[in-house]
Image: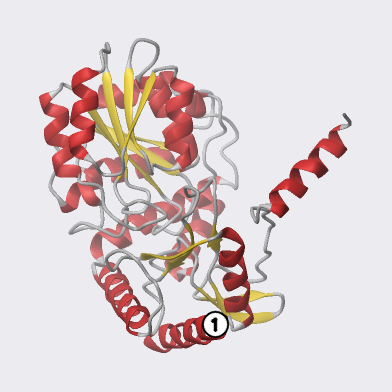
Amino acid sequence: MALEKLASERLLDLHTRGLLRDLRVVGSAADRWVDIGGRRTLLLCSNNYLGLATHPQLIAAAAEAAALWGVGAGGSRLISGSLALHQELEHELTDWKRTEDAVLFNSGYHANVGTIAALVGEGDAVFSDALNHASIIDGCRLSRARVVVYPHKDVDALAKELARTPARHRLIVTDSIFSMDGDAAPLREICTVAKRYDAWVMVDEAHATGVLGPTGAGLVEELDLHGSVDIQMGTLGKALGCFGAYVAGKRSVVQLLVNRARSFVYTTALPPPVVGAALAAVRMVRTQPQLRAQLHANAKFFHRALQNRGIPVSGEPSHILPVLLKDPTRTMQVSTRLLEAGVWVQGIRPPTVPEGTSRLRVTVMATHTPEDLQFACEAFVKVFTEERG
């Protein structure tokens, strides 16, 4: 069969099942309002939780870094691309995360895939929450360790699996805030079980970095579990508004990753403008708690507003608010109607979420105003009322 024919048949199958995806081009910066097809549209599906992607201080820091260091690192970190600017950000992250060391990766995907595969292998076992991000799932698979998937947030089930799974080394991996539901992992209980069964704990703080904790360092900081979590991973491209990721932990663990994480070793280093902006973002988040306070206030306001108007938003108030619609076709129809009403909320379908759990993934930003959120609420009410006939 010709490749083109094969591709066409697979695309048709995705279309038939309501799972076909396409790129929607944004004609403006990632702010609270964006340009979609020449129309001003309220953005409610971004990971730019604190609105820092367009902050003047970050833009200035990126420009300054470009002027001093150039626009590219020129090589991988282990060849010629390890700039003093990279090291400065790593030192800032180490202090922020209260660990011995930290290392930058080019994305959260790079960080998870590289770290898990570097730490465990044949003869080992990795225990993964059923709703962990795809990058964790792929990292588990690529590690060649035995992969044990436990039910979402079920610590009792995790303990039973740890007790009956023979392995040379055991690694528990979990998101701290789950990206599609906005709920938090029972991290304190996971750490207790890990200690009982001599397992390591790796936490993906992608959606908690900048959002939780007294200085915004994440759920580990929020729960004061620095001594119980072995590996903290997080991204620079969500609440911090930039790009890239980091892994923080014991110095020996970080140095092992520098030597053995293939996604670090064989990748050109992060560009200086990105690193400069990320450094400014971390420092801003650490010293400006009002940013996350406003984010949490907006999340509570919008969660309550949707619930009061009969919109099926699930879970507790969070910067990630899932509106479960279950059917993928219906989900995309509602997403399209909301866009026509001036609100961009992306529909999420399998395989990103389990079958039967398609949803609108609503995300608020610290920079959204009460008027923005009221406008969005009225759009939701209008679309859902029309849908119900």
184 to the left or right of 343: left
Q: Is residue 344 left or right of residue 221?
A: right
The residue indicated by pointer 1 is 383
Q: Is residue 382 above or below residue 252?
A: below
Which quadrant holds the N terminus? top right
Q: Amino acid at mark 1?
A: Val
In the depicted view, which residue is nearer to us: 369 or 274? Answer: 369
Secondary structure, mark 1, is: helix
User: Residue 312: horizontal and vertical position, in percent?
Assistant: 39, 72
Q: Choose between 141 and 20: the one closer to the eye.
A: 20
Residue extending farthest to the right is: 2
Along the viewing direction, whichever of 137 and 65 lies nearer the viewer: 137
298 to the left or right of 16 = left
Q: Residues within 10 Å of mark 1 (few under 14, many from 20)?
A: some
Residue visible at 23% across and 50% down in the picture: 219
**Residue at point 64%, 53% (across, down):** 19
Q: Position of residue 94 (x, y in %)?
A: 26, 40
| 202 is higher (above) or lower (below) than 142 | below
Left or right: residue 26 versus residue 310 is right
* Residue drawn at point x = 58 percent, y = 66 percent: 330
Quadrant location of the C terminus in the rendered image:
bottom right
Q: How many marks?
A: 1
Tell me if residue 13 comes above or below residue 260 in the rendering.
Answer: below
Q: In the displayed structure, would residue 324 be above or below residue 341?
A: above
Q: Please say whether residue 228 is visible from this viewpoint.
A: no
Q: Position of residue 198 (x, y in %)?
A: 16, 21
Residue located 48% across and 50% down the image: 353
The image quarter containing residue 336 is: bottom right
Image x and y of residue 117, in percent: 42, 22
